[in-house]
Amino acid sequence: MKKNTFVTQPSLPPLEEFIPYLQKIWNNKILTNCGPFHEQLEKALCEYLGVEHICLFTNGTLALVTALQALRITGEVITTPYSFVATSHSLLWNGIKPVFVDIAPDTLNLDPTKIEAAITPQTTAIMPVHCYGHPCDVDAIQRIADTYNLKVIYDAAHAFGVQRQTGSILKYGDLSILSFHATKVFNTFEGGAIICPDAKTKVRIEHLKNFGHVGEVTVVAPGINGKMSEFNAALGLLQLKYIDSAIERRQAIDKAYRERLKEVKGIHCLNSAGEEVANYAYFPILVQADYPLKRDELYQRLKDRGIHPRRYFYPLISDFPMYRGLPSAHRDNLPVANASALQVLCLPIYPDLEMSVVDEITRFIAEQ
Ligand SMILES: *Cc1c(COP(=O)(O)O)cnc(C)c1O
């Protein structure tokens, strides 16, 4: 390798195109508090994503925390241990007890067939993750939610632009949250959003993300400061101009990886896009027992070559100290998640990744 190649490299638009946005901000001196760029980005994202209502946030984690508050979720929430730790942290921040349920081996998403057994009288909601941007079994999850009168909040941090045949994946459940962090498919450096189905819920979320303020003298809830600044919103507007070409480029890399790894014994490529519109956010492989090396050996050898994949998701959330004492965190309760966490490796994928590097990575994996 000539230089180090990391799992992701943030997409940036041409710098000179950002200057006029900055000039506008400097001229009108509106820096935050839902200014003109904030409003424009909400409109543009609704249109691009094909959703009715969106509330922008300063990051995805505060969007998750606020989504739970918007629906007044309490007690226990069923969720996946196979995610980024912010998913469960948002529950702890609200004094809610996470209840971990195992994942399905084909998608590594929450396994709907295991959900019912975890429901108790304290359960109020299900919080699944569209892991790697691959849609959860939203129909099965909704059937369970309807039967037991539970809310569904999707952590859709990986799922920007993902669609099923019926339209955006973000329209399922009661609320979905997005992250626009630097490492995600669409980024505003830091940022996030809640997708909500109706104007009334949007108003409540807007109060909650602005200290609970309603007008000048009234505060209706102990809200947080979750507002996105004009700088980040302007950046989002510019990034949106390049998002289609960025996803196309990711698709080409995904295809190349699949073709080149197809014949490699013991390497399983996850989640090939089916009917749905995918975003190619990650390229996860499973290093299985018939591969000559263990996952961590391959991980280390790649790193020694200057290739830096990530073990998303290892360790499992359920193994972190603030979660591992929960009965549902026990390894016997989560066999698929535990096995997957020991096999998974996310290979580098981002729009500027050169095909020659993809060739080199796949050749190196095949040669071991
Ligand atoms: C990135 C991510 C988050 C957190 O989003 P931030 O914008 O970084 O706060 C939450 N959940 C998942 C699954 C993520 O990947």
Image (cartoon, grey):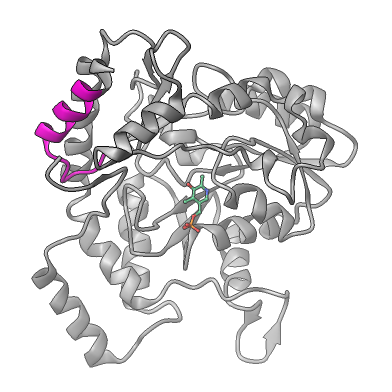
Residue 282 falls in image quadrant: top left
Residue 163 visible in the displayed image: no
Quarter of the image containing the N terminus? Answer: top left
Residue sitting at 75 percent across and 52 percent down?
73
Q: Which residue is drawn at the image coordinates 55% and 29% (left, top)? A: 341
At which x and y percent is residue 280? 31, 34
The answer to whether residue 207 of the structure is visible from this angle is yes
- Residue 355 image point, x, y percent: 11, 33
Which is the main secondary structure of the residues drawn in magenta? Answer: helix
Q: Quarter-wise, where is residue 288 in the image?
A: top left
Answer whether residue 37 is magenta in the image.
no
Q: Is residue 338 above or below residue 56?
A: above
From the top left corner, tell me how far across and down residue 16 is, in percent: 9, 72
Q: Nearer the viewer, residue 189 or 30?
A: 189
Q: Is residue 205 left or right of residue 257?
A: right
Q: Nearer the viewer, residue 97 or 296?
A: 296
Magenta region: which residues? Answer: 349-364
Magenta-colored stretch includes residue 359: yes
Residue at position x 34%, y 58% in the image: 182
